[in-house]
Image: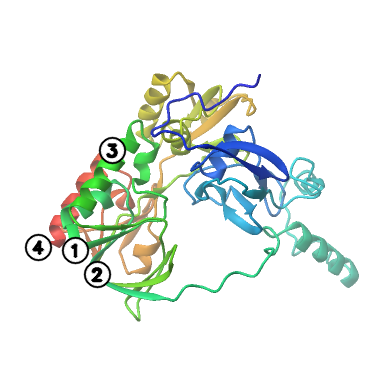
């Protein structure tokens, strides 16, 4: 009998058993699990192929930011499998392969062009040859095919005016919301509040406590709501919510957008079975799924990531074997049995505050939002937590609370 990777204690009771379909084959899962998590538990590592070289792709960040887990789901292409909960009867297919992901003939591009392919300069000797080659490139490239049906008519656009709009419901955003209370609306793209806490041992419980404190204080938390752009001329933040687009205006904006998981440069770093260290934590500590028989925690000694120690201790506590490695001493890894958890320092998610006029500087962590003593990054724009440079959940929560108190003065 195959080993069931759902042998770790989940942070919350599992949902009822359900069955969905992957390319016509039944897959057993539990209601509420993200599709990417359910497929991992079912032993499915390769979720698609890369658009140009058709290299195998699997989930990496498990929070909707890396585009490595795009699937065709219920007839709609290129949906993020890590953000779609499984449900009975759901249908999904993997993309960018011919005839299928496991036997993709187009993967020959990776073998034919080991040094890279500049398709703009290939086959340019004759017009006919170039036309044929460009047709082939268009067939090979892209991401998915058109949906089965036209999209439904969008819901009406709504307008909301609030005192303080907090973008990001991680530890910094929730701590700020608990301080500001009814003055705050918190916008977050994940299925529930918590942000980086969802990757920490015991983090789901702590996230629930912070969210409860924010809601009891009167703050309004919008989950599954993505802040997509700030329009300076109108002073509006566009937020895509499950009930349609909302145009948010506010007296102040507090960006607690956290930081993105990063990879490290090593051969085959893009292969299925290589995931971020925090994705490994989400699998184990939130969903109760064993990442692999052994987890290789890969780090860069020149840029340490404090989460490494917490991950290793947490995995050891639930009986998951780990070994530490650096890029220079990685050695051979069997990705069918082992998992590489890349522990690279996260990069600040600074796009929205930058769009809003925030000051930034480039350092080893990425584009870091600069703030003053009052957490201001520009007029009416404030920031706190990992978006100002990775500090970790505890320091981020403290910064969020301090930023909220500064906004109240």
Residue 187 appears at what percent x and percent y?
34, 59
The crowd level at tag 3 (other Cα within 10 Å; few <14, some 14-19, many 20+) is: some
Question: Residue at position x 39%, y 54% from top?
Answer: 349
Question: Residue at position x 50%, y 37% from top?
Answer: 16
Q: Which mark is residue 409?
A: 4
Q: Are marks 1 and 2 in contact (CB under 8 Å)?
A: yes
Q: CA distance from mark 4 to mark 3?
A: 28 Å
Residue 42 appears at what percent x and percent y?
62, 33
Please identify the quadrant where the N terminus is shown.
top right
The crowd level at tag 4 (other Cα within 10 Å; few <14, some 14-19, many 20+) is: few
Q: CA distance from mark 1 to mark 2?
A: 7 Å
Q: Considering only order in the chain, which callout, 2 or 3, is on the residue closer to the N terminus?
A: 2
Which residue lies under the disc numbered 1? Answer: 183
Q: Which mark is residue 162?
A: 2
Position of 122 relative to 333 (above/below): below
The crowd level at tag 1 (other Cα within 10 Å; few <14, some 14-19, many 20+) is: some
Q: Considering only order in the chain, which callout, 4 or 1, is on the residue closer to the N terminus?
A: 1
Q: CA distance from mark 4 to mark 2?
A: 17 Å
Q: Considering only order in the chain, which callout, 2 or 1, is on the residue closer to the N terminus?
A: 2
Please identify the quadrant where the C terminus is shown.
bottom left
Q: Secondary structure at mark 4?
A: loop
Q: Secondary structure at mark 3?
A: helix
Which residue lies under the disc numbered 3? Answer: 206
């Amino acid at each position: 009998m195959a080993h069931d990777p759902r042998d770790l204690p989940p942070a919350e009771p599992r949902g009822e058993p359900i069955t969905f379909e992957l390319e016509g084959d039944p897959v057993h899962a539990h209601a509420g699990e993200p599709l990417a998590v359910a497929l991992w538990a079912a032993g499915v590592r390769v979720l698609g192929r890369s658009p140009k070289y058709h290299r195998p792709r699997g989930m990496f960040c498990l929070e909707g930011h890396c585009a490595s887990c795009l699937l065709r789901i219920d007839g709609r292409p290129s949906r993020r499998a890590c953000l779609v909960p499984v449900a009975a009867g759901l249908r999904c297919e993997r993309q960018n392969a011919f005839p299928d992901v496991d036997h993709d003939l187009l993967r020959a591009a990776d073998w034919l062009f080991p040094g890279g392919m500049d398709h703009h300069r290939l086959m340019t000797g004759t017009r006919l040859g170039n036309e044929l080659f460009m047709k082939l490139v268009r067939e090979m490239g892209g991401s998915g095919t058109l949906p089965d049906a036209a999209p439904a008519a969008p819901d009406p656009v709504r307008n909301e005016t609030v005192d303080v709009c907090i973008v990001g419901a991680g530890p910094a955003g929730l701590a700020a919301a608990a301080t500001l209370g009814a003055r705050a609306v918190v916008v977050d793209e994940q299925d529930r509040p918590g942000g980086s806490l969802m990757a920490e041992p015991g983090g789901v419980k702590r996230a629930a406590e912070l969210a409860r404190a924010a809601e009891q204080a009167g703050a309004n938390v919008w989950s599954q709501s993505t802040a997509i752009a700030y329009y300076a001329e109108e002073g509006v933040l566009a937020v895509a919510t499950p009930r349609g687009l909302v145009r948010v205006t506010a007296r102040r904006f507090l960006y607690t957008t956290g930081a993105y998981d990063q990879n490290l440069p090593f051969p085959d770093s893009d292969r299925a079975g290589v995931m971020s260290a925090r994705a490994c934590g989400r699998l184990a500590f939130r969903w109760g799924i064993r990442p692999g028989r052994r987890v290789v925690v890969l780090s860069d000694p020149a840029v340490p990531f404090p989460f490494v120690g917490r991950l290793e201790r947490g995995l050891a506590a639930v009986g998951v074997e780990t070994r530490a490695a650096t890029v220079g001493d990685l050695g051979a890894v069997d990705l069918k049995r082992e998992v590489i958890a890349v522990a690279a320092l996260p990069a600040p998610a600074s796009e929205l505050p930058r769009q809003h006029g925030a000051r930034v500087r480039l350092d080893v962590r990425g584009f870091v939002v600069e703030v003053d003593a009052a957490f201001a990054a520009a007029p009416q724009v404030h920031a706190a937590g990992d978006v100002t440079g990775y500090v970790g959940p505890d320091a981020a929560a403290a910064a969020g609370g301090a930023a909220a108190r500064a906004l109240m003065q």
